């Protein structure tokens, strides 16, 4: 990923800046749509053996259903401590929260999520040489 950004920086440095009525800084800072929600989950406390045995067999298939429905695009296990990270195909924090709260760990209040709306790399607009579309 770092190599990708390094290549973009090299390309940006070599290309002449487009001359728009707006400055490149304004173009780069133009708003972008929210296309995904990054959900960073952590346990509210360590699970007991009884909780693991009763909740996790339901958590996995319910999470799989969200993956198959296209609501969870990717998922990872955290390396820094117990928890998970999902890249969700939803555009609002409210929708992501509602879906995650329906999972067994959410219903039991044993997992909480930090929900971050994310979108495309807006600053890459400065590399475009055509006239930018009007912003709202």
Image (cartoon, rainbow, N blue to C red):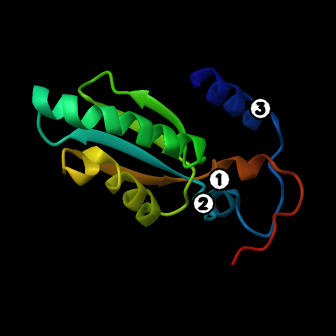
Front-lying residue, 68 or 22: 68
Q: Which residue is mark 2?
A: 29
Residue closest to the far right? 130
**Rendered position, 41 above or below 122:** above
Q: CA distance from mark 2 to mark 1?
A: 7 Å
Residue closest to the far bottom? 136
Q: Quadrant of the N terminus?
A: top right
Q: Position of residue 68 (x, y in %)?
A: 59, 41
Q: CA distance from mark 1 to mark 3?
A: 16 Å
Q: Position of residue 97 (x, y in %)?
A: 37, 59
Tag 2 near tag 1, CB within 8 Å: yes
Tag 2 near tag 3, CB within 8 Å: no
Front-lying residue, 124 or 69: 69
Give the tally of numbered discs: 3
Q: Which residue is mark 3?
A: 11
Front-lying residue, 17 or 66: 66
Label 2 packing within 10 angstroms: few (<14), some (14-19), many (20+):
some
Comes first in the chain, label 2 or label 1: 2
Q: Quadrant of the C terminus?
A: bottom right
Q: Which residue is mark 1?
A: 122
- The image quarter containing residue 84 is top left
């Amino acid at each position: 990923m770092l190599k990708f950004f390094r290549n973009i920086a090299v390309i940006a440095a070599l290309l002449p800046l487009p001359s728009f009525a707006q400055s490149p800084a304004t173009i780069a800072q133009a708003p972008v749509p929210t296309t995904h929600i990054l959900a960073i989950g952590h346990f509210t406390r360590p699970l007991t053996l009884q909780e693991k045995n009763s909740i996790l067999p339901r958590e996995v298939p319910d999470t799989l259903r969200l993956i198959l429905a296209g609501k969870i695009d990717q998922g990872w296990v955290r390396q820094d401590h117990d928890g998970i990270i999902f890249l969700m195909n939803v555009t609002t924090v409210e929708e992501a929260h509602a879906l995650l709260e329906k999972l067994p760990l959410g219903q039991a209040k044993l997992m909480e999520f930090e929900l971050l709306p994310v979108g495309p790399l807006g600053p890459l607009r400065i590399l475009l040489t055509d006239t930018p579309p009007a912003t709202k």
